[in-house]
């Protein structure tokens, strides 16, 4: 496919080389700032689809190891961890759940928990009283309505206390292999920056993106976009000058464009720092996160 067919301009010689991130040291390198793209204001839907899919292909090469950043060993642990992840970092959740799951390894155990004792265990994640109510409620529902098993259907998951479409899609995509789009704050921010949609409501964003990509891509697309939002395309100061998809981004220039300054903004393995998981996948190129209270 030519660049004219895709609705984008060709890469210039000043664009940063596309990294193949197989090691923690392979963060994007650039000797000069990438050129701002020339994306027509009247970009057709077909051109937008082609540009969006090209961005996804580029991200797949940058983050071949993209994965859910919550530690879990089974669907129940992923469900609980995702509920706890609201208004906090995955790192803080991962540092908190080992003690939680040691105390309450099954829905039956968690449903029978003393609320005050659970609150103390999950206090580091914030909003611990509300989250305790959700965990007690969903555990009781799993025990009473689903035989102690996490259901593998969206319509069942969203009936559980504290579980919305985002949480349900995380569980379905990563514990059951059912494709889903996870519209968290990072995902919503980036798809708007890339002009894939101007919708703000997560359900509407999900519907728009589902129309752009084949279902088989939904789960991994979510991981890649979220990885990029956490590592390079930050909310307050995106590292535009170190971004490997800058030539495809209509919002290029919102952040730091100087390559050297931009590289200092990179986070997690892209910047040579630990990731969010205490137990990351074997192919993760970064460093495991430290346990709670570790130096």
Image (spheres, helix red, strand yellow):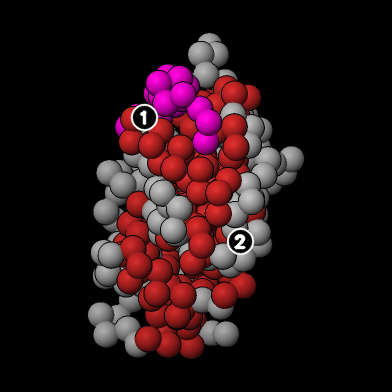
Q: CA distance from mark 1 to mark 2?
A: 27 Å
Residue at coordinates 59% horizontally, 40% vertically from top-left? 107
Q: Tell me if 67 is positioned left or right of 44 in this view.
A: right
**Spot occupied by residue 46 in the image (x, y as percentages of width and height):** 42, 87
Q: Is residue 110 magenta?
A: no
**Label 1's element?**
helix
Give the extent of the magenta segment.
Answer: 111-127
Camera-side residue of 278 and 151: 151
Camera-side residue of 19 and 65: 65
Q: Main secondary structure of the magenta part?
A: helix
**Spot occupied by residue 158 in the image (x, y as percentages of width and height):** 44, 59
To which quarter of the image does residue 129 belong?
top left
**Label 2's element?**
loop
Q: Identify the mark at residue 78; answer none if there is no mark.
A: none
Q: Is residue 178 above or below residue 134?
A: below
Residue 11 can be seen in this image: yes
Residue at coordinates 40% horizontally, 74% vertically from top-left? 207
Instruction: Please tell me which of labels 1 and 2 falls first in the chain.
Output: 1
Q: Local crowd at mark 1 within 10 Å, few (<14), some, or many (≥20)?
A: some
Looking at this view, name the residue that lies furthest to the front: 144
Q: Identify the mark at residue 128; answer none if there is no mark.
A: 1
Camera-side residue of 93 and 55: 93
User: Which residue has dot 2 on it?
Assistant: 152
Q: Is residue 150 above or below residue 107?
A: below
């Amino acid at each position: 496919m030519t660049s004219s067919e895709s609705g984008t301009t060709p890469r210039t010689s000043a664009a940063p080389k596309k990294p193949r991130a197989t090691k923690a040291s392979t963060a994007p390198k650039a000797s000069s700032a990438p050129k701002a793209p020339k994306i027509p204001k009247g970009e057709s839907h077909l051109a937008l689809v082609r540009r969006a899919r090209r961005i996804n292909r580029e991200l797949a090469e940058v983050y071949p190891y993209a994965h859910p950043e919550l530690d879990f060993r089974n669907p129940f642990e992923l469900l609980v961890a995702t509920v706890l992840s609201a208004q906090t970092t995955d790192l803080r959740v991962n540092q908190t759940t080992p003690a939680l799951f040691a105390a309450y390894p099954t829905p039956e155990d968690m449903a029978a928990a003393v609320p005050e004792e659970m609150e103390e265990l999950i206090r580091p994640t914030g909003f611990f009283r509300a989250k305790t109510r959700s965990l007690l409620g969903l555990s009781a529902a799993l025990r009473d309505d689903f035989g102690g098993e996490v259901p593998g259907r969206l319509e069942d998951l969203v009936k559980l206390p504290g579980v919305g479409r985002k949480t349900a899609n995380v569980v379905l995509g990563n514990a059951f292999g059912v494709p889903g789009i996870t519209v968290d704050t990072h995902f919503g921010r980036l798809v708007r920056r890339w002009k894939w949609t101007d919708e703000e409501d997560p359900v509407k964003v999900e519907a728009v993106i589902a129309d752009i990509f084949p279902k088989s891509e939904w789960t991994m697309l979510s991981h890649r976009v979220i990885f990029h939002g956490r590592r390079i395309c930050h909310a307050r100061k995106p590292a535009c000058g170190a971004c490997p998809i800058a030539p495809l981004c209509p919002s290029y220039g919102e952040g730091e464009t100087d390559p050297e300054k931009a590289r200092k903004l990179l986070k997690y393995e892209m910047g040579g720092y630990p990731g969010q998981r205490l137990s990351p996948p074997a192919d993760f190129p970064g460093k495991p996160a430290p346990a709670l209270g570790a130096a």
